[in-house]
């Protein structure tokens, strides 16, 4: 179930990379490859290297890089490296958020990473804040460049996370 959620998340997350940095064909390939990267560490590394080479990374590209760093943690067998990659991932996600504080997709990526990281590691400190920001976007119907499918999928994930209050679930449910 968790694997399906990660694949689902990466599938729709990859679809929103800016056209200014990647061609339409490259976006399609990246989208396909990010889904495969959930189970393929070499592909995760190559996608990260490709995005890392892009000049003047947007907040969204930076967010995708943070997501790939989280996948590196998933693929690592060494507990020290897992913690190192999660830590890097969350620093990268913070950088992306600092670049675009109002981007719901970036907030959602970080929420997802922290949601799947065991809480005893202490890396889940932004869950409540990101949840609040995501729900605020739904309350204000401020979805930026997010398409209808992304809006629906984020709402479903947030509800399924069991991290939302009944009032927040009511707001999110309106967009299913």
Image (cartoon, rainbow, N blue to C red):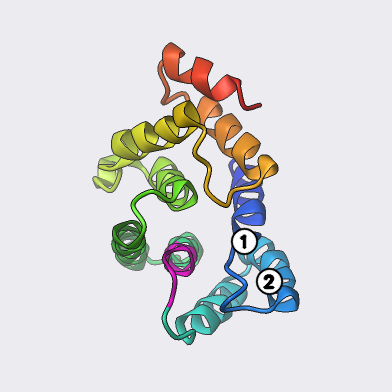
> Whole-Å distance between the Cαs marked 2 and 1?
7 Å
Q: Which residue is mark 2?
A: 27
Instruction: Say if the magenta span includes residue 64.
Output: yes
Residue at 45% across, 35% down: 137
Residue at 73% across, 74% down: 24
Of 99 and 39, nearer the camera is 99
* Marks 2 and 1 close (CB-CB < 8 Å): yes
Quadrant occupied by the C terminus: top right
Quadrant occupied by the N terminus: top right
Is residue 175 visible to the viewer in this orientation of the structure? yes
Is disc 1 placed on a helix, strand or loop?
Answer: helix
Is residue 161 visible to the viewer in this orientation of the structure? no
Q: Which residue is mark 1?
A: 14
Is disc 2 placed on a helix, strand or loop?
Answer: helix
- Magenta residues? 57-66
The vertical placement of 75 against 110, above or below, is: below
Instruction: Say if the magenta span includes residue 38.
Output: no
Rendering coords of residue 10 (x, y %): 61, 55
- Quadrant of the image occupied by residue 58: bottom left
Residue at 68% across, 65% down: 31
Residue lying farthest to the top in this orientation: 166
Mark linked to residue 141: none
Mainly helix, strand or loop, the magenta region?
Answer: helix
Could you tell whether 25 is left or right of 80 in the image?
A: right
Rendering coords of residue 44 (x, y %): 56, 72
């Amino acid at each position: 179930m968790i694997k399906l959620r990660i694949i689902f998340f990466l599938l729709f997350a990859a679809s929103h990379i800016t056209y200014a940095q990647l061609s339409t064909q490259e976006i399609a390939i990246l989208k396909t490859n990010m889904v495969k990267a959930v189970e393929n560490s070499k592909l995760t590394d190559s996608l990260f290297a490709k995005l890392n080479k892009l000049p003047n990374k947007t907040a969204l590209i930076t967010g995708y890089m943070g997501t790939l760093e989280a996948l590196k943690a998933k693929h690592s067998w060494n507990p020290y490296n897992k913690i190192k990659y999660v830590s890097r991932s969350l620093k990268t996600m913070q950088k992306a958020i600092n670049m675009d504080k109002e981007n719901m997709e970036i907030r959602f990526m970080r929420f997802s990473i922290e949601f799947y990281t065991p809480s005893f590691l202490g890396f889940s400190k932004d869950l409540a804040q990101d949840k609040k920001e995501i729900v605020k976007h739904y309350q204000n119907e401020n979805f930026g460049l997010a398409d209808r499918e992304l809006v629906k999928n984020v709402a479903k994930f947030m509800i399924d996370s069991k991290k939302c209050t009944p009032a927040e679930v009511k707001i999110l449910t309106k967009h299913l």
